[in-house]
Amino acid sequence: MWSEGTIRIPAADSKYTVVHYWVKHYEEPSEEYGINGGKISKLMLKADGKIICNYDRGWDIEPTCKEAELALCILLNNHN
C-alpha cells in the first residue's frame, strides 16, 4: 500500500520545515527489503523541492539532514 503526505518539522526560528513523503508499506515485515527489516520497502522524503532521503529496497540516499532523520523516525513509528 502507498501512503503520501506531509510532516511539519519544527525549525529553530519558530517556523516549520515541510517534509513531503511517499511510503510503500506492507502488512508483513521483510528482512530482505524492509527498512531495518520492517514493513517499509520504499520511501522518499522531499523538502524545498530536494530529495532528502530515498529508500528503494535499499538506501539510495540516506537521510541528509535532521529534518529527514526526524521524518524517517515518525514514519517508521507509524508504519512498522
Image: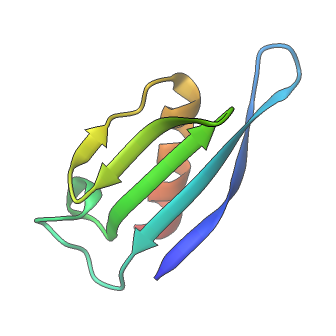
Instruction: Report x, y in % for residue 60.
Output: 27, 42
Q: Residue furthest top?
A: 13
Instruction: Report x, y in % for residue 73.
Output: 48, 46
In the image, 3: left or right of 49?
A: left
Image quadrant assignment for residue 32: bottom left
Q: Residue furthest left?
A: 32
In the image, 16: left or right of 21?
A: right
Task: Please name the residue shown 48% across and 45% down the image.
Answer: 72
- Placement of 35 over or under 41, stated as above or below: above
Task: Please name the residue shown 13% across and 66% down the image.
Answer: 31
In the image, 9: left or right of 15?
A: left
Instruction: Report x, y in % for residue 24.
Output: 42, 71
Q: Residue furthest right?
A: 14
Q: Nearer the viewer, residue 68 or 50?
A: 50
Task: Please name the residue shown 70% across and 54% down the image.
Answer: 6
Task: Please name the residue shown 36% across and 85% down the image.
Answer: 27
Instruction: Report x, y in % for residue 55.
Output: 32, 51
Quadrant where the image shows the C terminus: bottom left
Number of labels in the image equals 0
